[in-house]
Amino acid sequence: MTRFVRWFVPGWYAGFPVAGFPVAGCPVAGWRRCLGFVALMALMVLGTPAGWWHQTGYAQSSKVLSEAELLGALRAFRAEIEGMQKQLAASPLSQPVGRRTLRYDEYSALYANWSSRVQERYGVLNGYYEEVNRIYRANPNSRLYLDIRKAYLDAKTTFDALSTSLAQCAKPEDTRTPTIVVTDGRLNTHLTKTVATVKTETTPTVDIGQVDELRYIGKFDAVELYLLVHHGMACYVMYGLHERKVDASGHVVDEIDPRMVFSRTFDVSKVQNFTPQEHLDYVLTLDLTPVQAQLETWRFITESLARAKSYARGD
């Protein structure tokens, strides 16, 4: 029973130096042995909190690894984590805010998945730590112990780098922007005059697929206003102009104009710190061009705008 208790109760027999590995210790006082035994018995009788065994690493595997198996497992674990680092670097989580290829709900799901994967690998690493401790306690002069310890430190360093990389990715809640709705009538009136007097083009002035940033500003008179930024230059894109028409039965109906309206380009530094209201005031001073793109291009643009808009709270 004493051997059983020593194995399961951390700190029962050995101390832990700064590096995190056990060093030769001495038997602890009798009262601490008693407390350790009582604690173990309580866990066995009352049960452990949910996830306790997993978090401490004891649930890593019911199989006791040999020294050679542990060394191989640690090296394989490190290689796996290095692969995960490459995957994370190439994932949408690591993309700049303005070039996200996912909607907000997709981004949130991907972030949650990565968080779960990293947490699960953390549990595995904890399990390996316990195996390293076991081997040290059983045979501190083992021929493979130094190799095992180095492999563990290498694996932990690699895992810590992965964990840091994930921590640098924007959390879903930090990507949300306020929902802005203004209904003063100015933008809708301005656009109605523009589309009626300016020639409609078939090609956008800016390739939306190449922009450095696509930002949803807000909704003004049911018209969605976006800011496109590319190489220090910017322009506004507006979509959702409503037109009132009379149908065949004589009823007045609202129809959404399929055209998008692009402003002329300007230096992005002029508007970088604008409030939504200031963006509205500025767009009303610019020359505007309606664009009726081909269907494939139109779909790509509207999908891109929808992705940017999905990060607004409530939309």
Image (cartoon, helix red, strand yellow):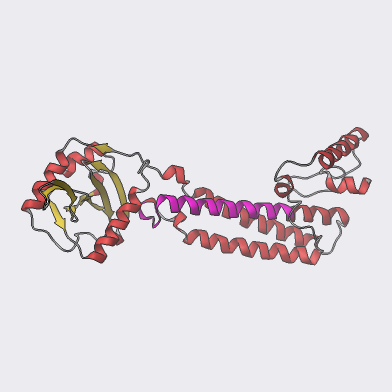
Residue with the most extreme front position:
249
On the rendered structure, is 310 left or right of 150?
Answer: left
Across and down, in percent, residue 90 comes to 47, 61
Q: Magenta: predominant secondary structure element?
A: helix
On the rendered structure, is 107 left or right of 26?
Answer: left
Q: Is 226 in front, or is 213?
A: 226
Query: Dividing the picture into quarters, in which one does residue 73 lie?
Result: bottom right
Image quarter of the C terminus: top left
Q: Is residue 121 located in the magenta-colored stretch of the structure?
A: yes
Q: Residue at x 81, y 38 (%)?
A: 46
Q: Is 256 in front, or is 98?
A: 256
Q: Residue at x 10, y 48 (%)?
A: 250
Query: Dividing the picture into quarters, in which one does residue 203 lie?
Result: bottom left
Q: Residue at x 16, y 47 (%)?
A: 253
Q: Is 301 in front, or is 254?
A: 254
Please indicate, yes or no, whether residue 193 appears anywhere in the rendered image.
yes
Residue numbers of the magenta segment: 98-127
Residue with the most extreme left position:
197
Across and down, in percent, residue 89 comes to 49, 59
Q: Residue at x 57, y 55 (%)?
A: 162
On the rendered structure, is 213 left or right of 167?
Answer: left
Across and down, in percent, residue 271 comes to 24, 43
On the rendered structure, is 154 left or right of 3?
Answer: left
Q: Is 252 in front, or is 267?
A: 252
Across and down, in percent, residue 285 comes to 13, 43
Q: Is residue 151 located in the magenta-colored stretch of the structure?
A: no
Above or below: residue 189 compared with residue 212: above
